[in-house]
Image (cartoon, rainbow, N blue to C red):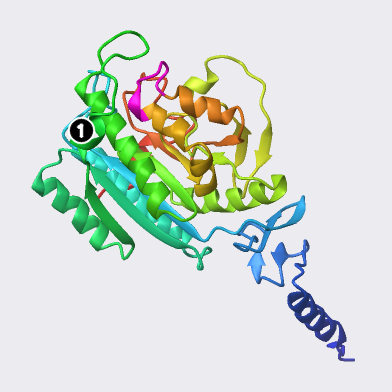
Amino acid sequence: MREIKSNKKNIFTKLFIKISRFLGFEIIDQSNFTAPVSSKGLNETLSIAGKRSITLPLGEIKITRKIKYFDVILRTCMTVNMLTQSKKRVFEKDKEEYTKRTLVSIIKSIKHAKINFKETKFKIYVIDHNSNKDQIKIKNDILKNSGIEFEIKKLDFEKFSKEIKKINEENKEVTSNQKSNMSNIHQSILLSKEKCQDLTYFVEDDYLHHLDTISEILFTYEKVSSIINNELVICPTDYPYLYMEPENTNLIIGEKRHWRKIDQTLCSFVMSKKIIEKYYDDLISMCKYEHYPFEKPLHKIYNKELCISPIPSLSVHFTNINSIYGLSPNVDWKKLWEENES
């Protein structure tokens, strides 16, 4: 006798999925490892930008802090190999090569982020100092072919360098390279305050990024900010110097990474317009007087505002291989380098 299969169960399942989709609920089918409402596998991103964050098996968090704008301000100087060191960088290439790969990695990561953050507007600003015409053209061509809105600005070194005190906190004369760095940071912060409307990623031109860097930053910012009902600071780099001494920390689960609370960064970080306006004078003080450590004003802010960094790292500082401020641990540096060839 032929077995007659009923379609009642299948019809009921389809109806239940439609109702769940209408109500904004997600269903987990652990038998075939899928989320039927989203038509995704459980190993895919189930979160919806600006609406909800889903982390299995912890459940769903409603997003109350939607990110509307994400601006990158990239500080470039292709003529200076290392700011404060004489040692060569890992792979021992000219500075120009690190800058190009940094820019390529940022562009690729933004394009990847656009898949989920369709309503977020992205823009890249480049503030350059002393790169020659050919080097400027290289950056312009890379950005022009990206399809991402961008502007390349020249550092107004004369304007900002005049505000820098000549003697630093160690009672030493501030070097010309450091004056350039401080001036570029100053112009970057001012640009963010005047032009950027939400999150700004301040970054130097020797940081390479994973494909999912920007996506993870945005998903995690929305999630954590919605949980704490406050703004925060994100440092995408897991610096090796943060492991020099054992310290207590708090762990947070982002979208695809674990994050930990930190109280120190270098000068590449993501900060909201609200925090920039709140601590503007403190941020600018870093550009007018060379503290020791240089980032001391930032660290004071982190004593008041939550700052987190990912494990493993989302971006890597490609400096000398022995620098405690450089290559992040447990990352395939060579693979990241090769993936972002221009």
Q: Which residues are magenta?
A: 287-294
Left/right of residue 175 with respect to residue 57 in the rendered view: left
Find disc 1 in the rendering and name its residue.
Answer: 93
Residue drawn 64% across the image and 67% down it: 40
Q: Nearer the viewer, residue 184 or 34?
A: 184
User: What residue occupies the far top of the structure in this picture?
Assistant: 171
Q: Is residue 210 magenta?
A: no
Q: Position of residue 270 (x, y in %)?
A: 48, 43
Q: Is residue 152 visible?
A: yes
SS for tag 1?
loop
Q: Is 169 situated above or below 51?
A: above
Of residue 172 and residue 334, the one placed in the foreground of this image is 172
Residue that appears at 31% across and 23% down: 320
At 26% from the left and 45% from the top, the residue drawn is 127
- Residue at the limit of the structure toward the left, as seen here: 133
Q: Can residue 82 be seen by looking at this rendering?
A: no
